[in-house]
Amino acid sequence: MRYLVFSCLLVLFSACASETDGGLTIDVHLADAAGLSANLDRIVLGGEKEMLKSASIDQNGDFTFEFAEPLRDGLYQVRVGAQKATLALSSDDNQVEIDGELGTFGSYDFSVTGSESAEETVETVRQIAEVRGLEALEDKIDGIENDYVAAYVTFNSLLRAGEQGLPIHERVLARLAPDDPNRMTYAQYVDQVRQQVNFQKSQEQIQPGKPAPDLTLTDPDGETVTLSDLRGQVVLLDFWAAWCGPCRRENPNVVKVYNRYKDQGFTIFSVSLDGIDDRQAQRLTPEQLETARENQRQKWVAAIEQDGLTWDNHGSELRKWSSDATAKYGVRAIPATFLIDREGNIAEVGLRGASAIEQALQKVL
């Protein structure tokens, strides 16, 4: 009798567990889609798609995606031919139903039930299409409950917003988990926008007579070096890198001018573009990134010693072309130099060779 009761309890428990921890079924009806095939992809904002399931559509326009286990929280896309719709799904979803027509599926003219996340996606995409003005859009985005819906809508609605969209992007980005692939690719996009904005500003600001943007960087010993601390001296701001052949060949010219004028109120602020850029960093573990950046730091230090760059002001973000300093000054190629006068204004741009540097320097000393 004891064994019979135990067996019944085991069956009952298994049934309950099955009902609670079941997989996911997505039943779709799309009129006029008979005979076509459908796909379900997991998507990453600004990244690659992963096809999870494919299904044939029967003569009634019906098809089903079935999963033995729940799908993790995220963004998923249903594709039928050229028509596609992206939905946020939750790991709590078990039975989702979609009903619509093929011709209007891509414009989100369909109904969805069984998933609060998917329902909010459809409702939000429809409403966003009617929103006018950045302020109204921001209010709408702030009211979105699901983090993935907020990220998807923000990413796609503000692709061309430039600097005005950055605060909204950054706020929505912070809602995603640090290890979420969507956050990683989204962060890369936001960094690119930020660098483009800074570059555009630099084109207006980095001209003779304009104030030189300040820089605060870390030297090879981990100490802070700041460009504005050199105010009162004439400064050659020099962007270079240990891996840059033209830079290394130009260094003897820079050293020659420095040694000749260092006692007359002239110094150099060197910005190294050694390091690991943000795209490379995304592919490394924190430990690997730390090791890689340390290797780059050592190459930087070795180049300073080998080329006799004896001045004190050496700084780097060890982020290569992803550094904020390059964006501030609009640097797209190195070596790149900017002569800054005693008042902190840009005097000359793009000096190469000892004679050119010396001639410009004599005008402002």
Image: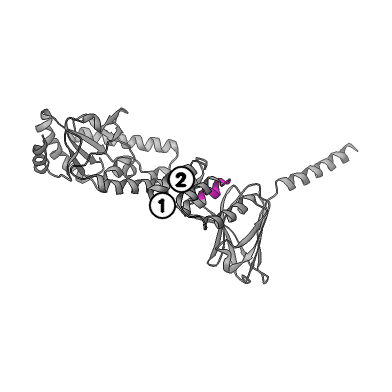
Q: Pointer 1: what residue?
A: 161
Q: Quadrant of the N terminus?
A: top right
Q: Earlier in the sequence, mark 1 or mark 2?
A: 1
Q: Position of residue 177 (x, y in %)?
A: 52, 41
Residue range of the region highlighted in magenta in the rendering = 144-151
Quarter-wise, where is residue 270 in the image?
A: top left
Q: Quadrant of the C terminus?
A: top left
Q: Outermost residue toward the right?
A: 1
Q: Position of residue 336 (x, y in %)?
A: 21, 44
Instruction: Answer left or right for 99 relative to 351.
Output: right
Magenta span dominant secondary structure: helix
The kind of secondary structure element at disc 1 is loop
Q: Position of residue 197 (x, y in %)?
A: 34, 47
Is-magenta flag for residue 131?
no
Q: Can you see residue 44?
A: no
Distance, label 1 to label 2, CA atoms, is 10 Å
Q: Pointer 2: what residue?
A: 168
Judge by depth and name the residue closer to the eye, 234 or 278. Answer: 234
Q: Can you see residue 227?
A: yes
Instruction: Answer left or right for 187 relative to 318.
Output: right
In this figure, what is the number of numbered marks?
Answer: 2
| Residue type (three-letter) at the residue carrying disc 1 | Ala
Q: Is residue 151 above or below residue 257?
A: below
Is-magenta flag for residue 149?
yes
Q: Residue at x 35, y 41 (%)?
A: 276
Instruction: Answer left or right for 32 relative to 271.
Output: right
